[in-house]
Amino acid sequence: MPRILAQSIVGLLAFAFVSCASDGGPGPLDSMHWILGDWRAESGNELVIEKWRLASEVTFEGTGLTLSKSDKSVKSEETLRLVTMGGEVFYLAKVAENDFPVPFKMTSHTNSKAIFENPERDFPNKLIYHRIGMNALKVDVMGTNEPGFTLHFKR
């Protein structure tokens, strides 16, 4: 098959996938555009940075980075995604400790709050993102057998 024909078929299939994923109306991620941008939080001797970008109308891509405040060394990194699949939204976190991304299903959302849960995990098994005005987020990280924590992000 000529290369240009193969590229056209791949492009058509990608367009069909995105078209099927969205019916043209408001999608589940539309109420979460407030999460997009660069965020910083301080927690003890750590600086936590999250960055979220719009990848498509059905996907937000993010990164998470935890640095030591004292020497700026990287303590942890993660790749994050908010993805609409089958009309539902999933928060996917890819961390070094796991071979595969860890999924959290959005179980509730409003224009200023989103709850993601994965009852199969001990910690974390629940993430709650709260929008506080235009330039602040509060993220509650909760678990079953471990005490949770809260991060207060500023844009």
Image (cartoon, rainbow, N blue to C red):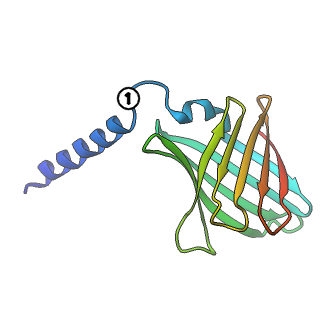
Return the residue nearer the eye: 117 or 112.
117
In what quadrant of the picture does the C terminus appear?
top right
Return the residue nearer the eye: 51 or 149.
149
Q: Which residue is located at x 62 percent, y 44 percent?
A: 107
User: Percent x, y for residue 37?
Assistant: 66, 39
Quarter holding residue 123:
bottom right
**Residue 36 visible to an observer of this rendering:** no
Question: Is 106 left or right of 131, judged from the image as shown?
Answer: left
Q: Which residue is located at x 61 percent, y 30 percent?
A: 31
Q: Which residue is located at x 67 percent, y 39 percent?
A: 35
Query: Residue under circle 1?
Result: 23
Return the residue nearer the eye: 25 or 38.
25
In what quadrant of the picture does the N terminus appear?
bottom left
Question: Is 134 left or right of 109, judged from the image as shown?
Answer: right
Q: Which residue is located at x 14 percent, y 49 percent?
A: 4
97 relative to 1, above or below: below
33 relative to 55, above or below: above
Q: Secondary structure at mark 1?
A: loop
24 relative to 94, above or below: above
User: Percent x, y for residue 115?
Assistant: 68, 45
- Which amino acid type is shown beneath numbered disc 1? Asp
Return the residue nearer the eye: 31 or 137.
31
Q: Label 1 neighbourhood size at 10 Å, few (<14), some (14-19), many (20+)?
A: few
Quarter holding residue 72:
bottom right
User: Percent x, y for residue 128?
Assistant: 74, 47
Question: Is 141 left or right of 81, judged from the image as shown?
Answer: right
